[in-house]
Image (tube, grey):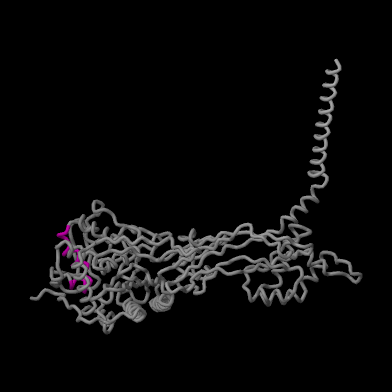
Amino acid sequence: MKAKKSTRRRTSIVLLVVLALMASLVYKLFDIQVVHASALTAQAAERRGTAVTLYGARGDIVGDDGTVLAGSVLRYDFIASPVNALSAYTDTEDKPLPHDQAMEKFAADPVLAKLSKITGKPVSSFVTAFTDAFKANAKSQYAPLVANVDVPTFDKIQALKIPWLTAVSHPARTYPDGAVGGNIVGYVNSSGLGAEGLEQQYQQCLEGENGEETYQASRDGVALPGSTKVTKEAKQGGTLQTTLDPDLTWFLNQNVASTTKSLGAQFGQATVVDIKTGEIKAAAQYPSVDPNNIDSVPAAYRSTAMMFSNMYEPGSVFKALTAAAMVDTGYATPASHIMTPDHFSGPNGVSFGDAEYHPTEDMTLTGILMNSSNVGIATLSANMSDQTRYEYYKKFGIGTKTAVDFPAQSSGQLSKPSQWDDQTKYTTTFGQGVSATQAQMLQAYQALANGGVMVPLSLVKGCKQADGTMTDVPKKTQTRVIKESTSKTVLDMMESVVQQGSNAPVLKIPGYRIAAKTGTAQEPDGHGGYQSNFYISVMGVAPVDNPQYLVSVNIGFPANHRMSDAAAPLFHTVMSQVLKTYRVSPSNSAPTMLPPYYPN
């Protein structure tokens, strides 16, 4: 009986102890989570330290010589504390003035005039910022006054020693060469993400990753020595290495702009391609966006490079591709000839003509290219099947986006032969009824000039990561389009155009063998007809005996001169500069002179 009582007593004692412990724990939790919660939270925050963002800068975009085309710099925003600013204005008894009187004092404060002079912002904008802040919060401590100032401006503002003004730094994008390459480089949006061009295409390569460090601060906000600790390393973005030559691109920009203006045209383009590598060495257009100020040009020219996005009917420069198809399949040789009037009329309303009147002449294929005869190229190629010709156009890259994969790139339009009407069967031979971009025509001519082997066009060499590794290196899978002998034959015919054609005096470059084809094309009206707007262009290769560089110039909708000879001087200027820039050795053989007419 005593044993049972003893057991119950021990059990009761244990239960009392457990209950006491539980009560103690509950009390402690209540004390921590309720009674001293605020103080403990503040203490924990103090021990944890102040967190500071470590910015992972966006990577640079550089030219082929390392010149920075797009880079990241620190910029500063200045934030005011309206409450603290107005509390500085007191009456004779050193008491804060009423709000309205304090605002009047603020608006007349000489320091605002100094701030206005440094930043270029009117004093009224500072007053408005304070007014808006107080509308949102009567005790506001936040009013943005100045944004995105550079280091020299930052230093000048700091020298004013305004106690209620705080600077906050952040990375920003800068484009040192402005509009030079702006159509290719693109720009970033307000969130710092690539919005157009290479900035958008290579966002993953360029984007940095922010880190964080913490430090413990004294009561006055000063970091305690030895307390700084990096909790997350920042990661810098990669460096995008392009194929662009900045100096050559600048030269093209200047000359495209002056030519476009002098011809009263709406826009102009010029591009240089290394034939052996497919690298785009320069790509200029006018108007061209300055990424530092995208509002500097109309909205239509801010989005992306015209050479990739703007479709047009290429016109007579397309004839070289038709000639290559005929020669490669054995349907024609440079000496193949046909009686060529200046106008052709066929069944089912088929009708087209040459740009200028001429008597009926027995032109060779060389002469057809030299005289840029629509009638000649269409009738001479009539024996070739539509399907065969279509397949050659496809192999040249017409109707397919280039490997550059540039944002908003167009694929052009090349319909299947089954969809060609009677008119289109003829007009596709001279670049009507088919549309392409400048990039596609450059790709086609690259293959034409490179012994018939297509090397994909490229704008970048790769993305160099912080650890030195290269990513985003473009693939260079080569494909044969035409025979090597065909390439040489077509270049010889195009050289005869330069040597004997009407534009010969302008297209020739002393010491070098040049092959070129001019073109004039109209803008379709979308209803089966054509507008009064024209494209004038020249595409050419140098030197013919060792093809190294391809130059294309294209002027859109000129008002003062609508024939292709108006584009020839720009081609001559650009190609001459290219040969000089890359120190291309002069030709050591005589130019080819093929007969343009069949001898009587």
Q: Which residue is nearer to you in this view: 41 or 444?
A: 41
Q: Position of residue 455 (x, y in %)?
A: 31, 64
Query: Going by the image, does 386 lie left or right of 599?
Result: right
Quadrant location of the C terminus in the rendered image: bottom left
Q: Is residue 197 visible?
A: no
Q: Position of residue 573 (x, y in %)?
A: 35, 80
Residue lying at the far front in this picture: please name it. 3
Quarter-wise, where is residue 560 in the image? bottom left
Q: How many numbered marks, from 0 up?
A: 0
Q: Position of residue 319 (x, y in %)?
A: 24, 67
Q: Which residue is nearer to you in this view: 44 or 5?
A: 5
Secondary structure character of the magenta stretch overall: helix
Residue lying at the far bottom in this picture: please name it. 510
Magenta segment: 366-384
Q: Is residue 310 visible?
A: yes
Residue located at (36% from left, 71% from top): 271
Q: Position of residue 411 (x, y in %)?
A: 35, 58
Query: Going by the image, does 75 lie left or right of 496?
Result: right
Quarter-wise, where is residue 100 in the image? bottom right
Quarter-wise, where is residue 1 in the image? top right
Residue located at (80% from left, 38% from top): 25
Query: Going by the image, does 214 lie left or right of 245?
Result: right
Q: Which residue is nearer to you in this view: 445 or 14?
A: 14
Question: Does 565 appear above or below 242?
Answer: below
Q: Which residue is nearer to you in this view: 182 or 412?
A: 182
Q: Is residue 160 magenta?
A: no
